[in-house]
Image: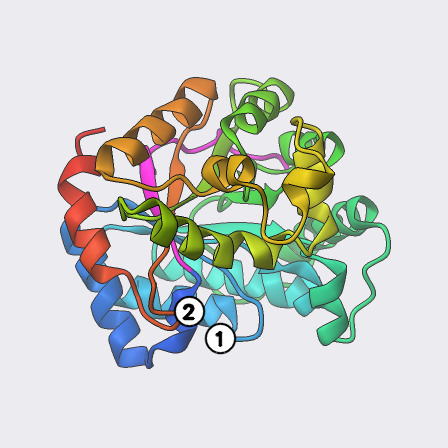
Amino acid sequence: MSRPPARREIGKVGIWSGQFDFSPAAVVREAVAELDDLGYPTLWTGEVKGREVLVTAALALAATSRMTIATGIAQILARNPLTMTAGQLALAEAYPDRFLLGLGVSHAELMHIRGASYTRPLAQMAAYLDEMDRMAVEQYRAVPPPGVPPRVLAALGPKMLGLARDRADGAHTYFVPPEHTAAARDILGPGKLLVPEQAFVLHTDPEQARELARRHTGSYLRLPNYTTNLRRFGFDDDDLAGSGSDRLVDTIVPWGDADVLLGRIKEHLDAGADQVAVQVLDFDRRGLPRRQWRELAPVLSAL
């Protein structure tokens, strides 16, 4: 199946959040509607052990009128290719030009929870895309969307980025420095979407901000996919130990006022990102950073 030109009307700054699982559906709808009203053009959300991500996307799409809702990511080993295709096509038909499917193989540790076998991720993804394309043509029987809906791949290494270039509309990267964005753009070329996630702590006290940042980095530095990728960009054993060195923490999770965040976003954009998906961290482990979203909206909308 031929891919349409990569869409670029998703805005330069989106919101990324995995916190919606901790709120009831009514609060999710209210919070997402507020993001829409604040002018954020895109919302990214993923899945681990909470709501099924296409269900979350449907909740968000129903609660909004303008925003693009993107999965970052839908795990391919969590559902078979026909199920994924059916979910994508149904949402794309119901909400034209507002659903962006991000696909990923995820991590071995997370796939074991599902009883799935994480073996050769690049081959698994390529075969899965083959089946999705076949299912869309041969098996899907509901009313289709008017065109081929977009998809991006979660990609860190050069080979998966190459697959994102050849078989998708681009890549969604996560837990990466701006140097990775530049390298990813070189691989993807000029015609594909590139959306890195960028975590941020809107707090100016160094000790408190880094404490919150380390709560974030510590959970990801246990996953080999991320540590292997960071080593490509000069981080060593000392940086990757525990919850990360100050150098790593400040690179992956900058902290401070809105100007600090703007500076980091511009680094990614200058390196070749089309959009930066900002994940604002909050001291409340189960809360939504709605105060921060409100405070940042006027600043980020100026980009």
Mark 1 and mark 2: span between their CA atoms? 7 Å
Please identify the quarter of the rendering in which residue 262 is found.
Answer: top left
Residue at x 54% of width, y 45% of height:
151
Magenta residues (range): 1-17
What crowding class fits label 1: few (fewer than 14 Cα within 10 Å), some (14-19), or many (20 or more)? some
Q: Is-magenta flag for residue 3?
A: yes
Image location of residue 229, percent across then percent down: 69, 37
In percent of width and height, residue 218 lies at: 58, 56
Q: Quadrant of residue 188?
A: top right
Residue depicted at x 20% and y 44%: 296
Depth check: 288 or 206 in front? Answer: 206
Residue 176 lies in the magenta-colored region: no
Main SS, magenta region, reads loop
Query: Which label's residue is closer to the chain start, 1 or 2?
Result: 1
Name the quarter where the N terminus is drawn: top right
The residue positioned 33% from the left and 44% from the top of the image is 14
Q: Residue at x 85, y 50 (%)?
A: 120
Which image quadrant is residue 290 in?
bottom left
Depth order, front residue of 174/87: 174
In the figure, 142 relative to 105: above or below?
below
Query: Neighbour class for label 2 at 10 Å: few (<14), some, many (≥20)?
Result: many
Mark 1 residue type? Arg
In the foreground, 218 or 302:
218
Left or right placement of residue 136 versus residue 25 in this view: right
Q: From the image, tell me which residue sits under label 1.
A: 51
The residue sitting at the front extreme is 207
| Amino acid type, callout 2 | Thr
Residue 56: image tag? 2
Quadrant assignment for the C terminus? top left
Color scheme of the displayed model:
rainbow
Q: Are marks 1 and 2 in contact (CB under 8 Å)?
A: yes
